[in-house]
Image: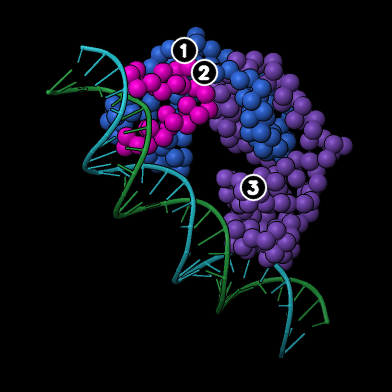
Chain colours: A purple, B blue, C cyan, D green
Amino acid sequence: MIVTIDFNSDEAFYIQLRNQIIIGIACAKIREGDNLPSVRELAEDIGINMHTVNKAYTILKQEGYVKLDRRKGAVISVDADKLKAINEIMEDMKVILAKAICKNISCEEIHKLVSNIYSEYSPDNC
Amino acid sequence: MIVTIDFNSDEAFYIQLRNQIIIGIACAKIREGDNLPSVRELAEDIGINMHTVNKAYTILKQEGYVKLDRRKGAVISVDADKLKAINEIMEDMKVILAKAICKNISCEEIHKLVSNIYSEYSPDNC
DNA sequence: ATATTTGTTATATACATACTATAACACAAT
DNA sequence: ATTGTGTTATAGTATGTATATAACAAATAT
């Protein structure tokens, strides 16, 4: 599991971290029970401040992807509150799909796109 | 076409505006050639500053949803650069679908969700 | 026992972004 | 001439992001 920061991106560091870790879990590069590097270690590795990593971990905890343990550090533990997740995803999707409709992208095209991304995330492919 | 601001949201006002206008176009509540209220008028209506509305309009122009005309104001004009739009949507989708996979939401469930939102945006339903 | 490593909390600083407030400008319509 | 467009400029405040140091409590390792 390699995490990198794009220092030129307009996306906040802690958001970049959060996203990459979520993608890592989706790809099964990191699995239930695995632990992430400590905030200090990861911060050192990628060259950013400890508090920025801590912010990412805290958000991942709030969103139900990890549990923070004083002994082991941050441990992957996905709470599968599916209903809550679906509602959140629906909200995110609304704006994206409105954009798609404006740009004349059909529902079928989105279906294909979704399927492609799903298979990209298959453990075989990453 | 009614635009409202959630003053308690953590989303920036100009992003809220942008999103609502994109959704308005998707729903055909506002159509190609229609013009949005002037920055001053809309700002007055919803109780925010002129420059914030201007920022939303400028972004909508950059993203290819409106053209700004000194005479008519902001006129809906969607440039359908489909390829560019698809690439952008793919990027947005990657994180959302990673999230979905983590939360055990299947590809089929996402397909249904997408179809539902598409039909919600049908002019009949809004 | 002591030292080390965890997450956690506190304070302070620097910088960028978001929002507001006034003001003025160029251009077109009335 | 006056009014209404978008546009630009400047300034101020508030919030968010990222950094730097420092310290704490709890668990582990030596």
User: Are discs 1 and 2 less than 8 Å apart at CB?
Assistant: yes
Looking at the rendered structure, the secondary structure element under dot 1 is loop
Q: Nearer the viewer, residue D11 or A63?
A: D11
Task: Give the magenta range.
Answer: B49-78
Q: Nearer the viewer, residue B126 or B68?
A: B68
Residue shown at the point (69%, 35%) measured from the top left? B94
Q: Position of residue B12 (x, y in %)?
A: 44, 40
Which label was assigned to residue A16? 3
Q: Amino acid at mark 2?
A: Val
Q: Are marks 1 and 3 on the same chain?
A: no
Residue highlighted by disc 1: B32
Mark 1 vs mark 2: which is more N-terminal? 1
Picture mark count: 3
Residue shown at the point (76%, 30%) measured from the top left? A118
Residue highlighted by disc 2: B78
Residue shown at the point (71%, 51%) measured from the top left? A4
Q: Is residue B72 above or below residue A55?
A: above
Residue shown at the point (75%, 45%) measured from the top left? A24
Mark 3 crowd level (few <14, some 14–19, many ≥20, 10 Å Cα): some
Q: Position of residue B87 (x, y in %)?
A: 67, 28
B71 part of magenta stretch: yes
Based on the displayed image, in which of its 4 quarters is residue B3 positioned? top left
Q: Amino acid at mark 1?
A: Glu
Check the picture and name the quadrant holding the C terminus of chain A: top right
User: Are discs 1 and 3 less than 8 Å apart at CB?
Assistant: no
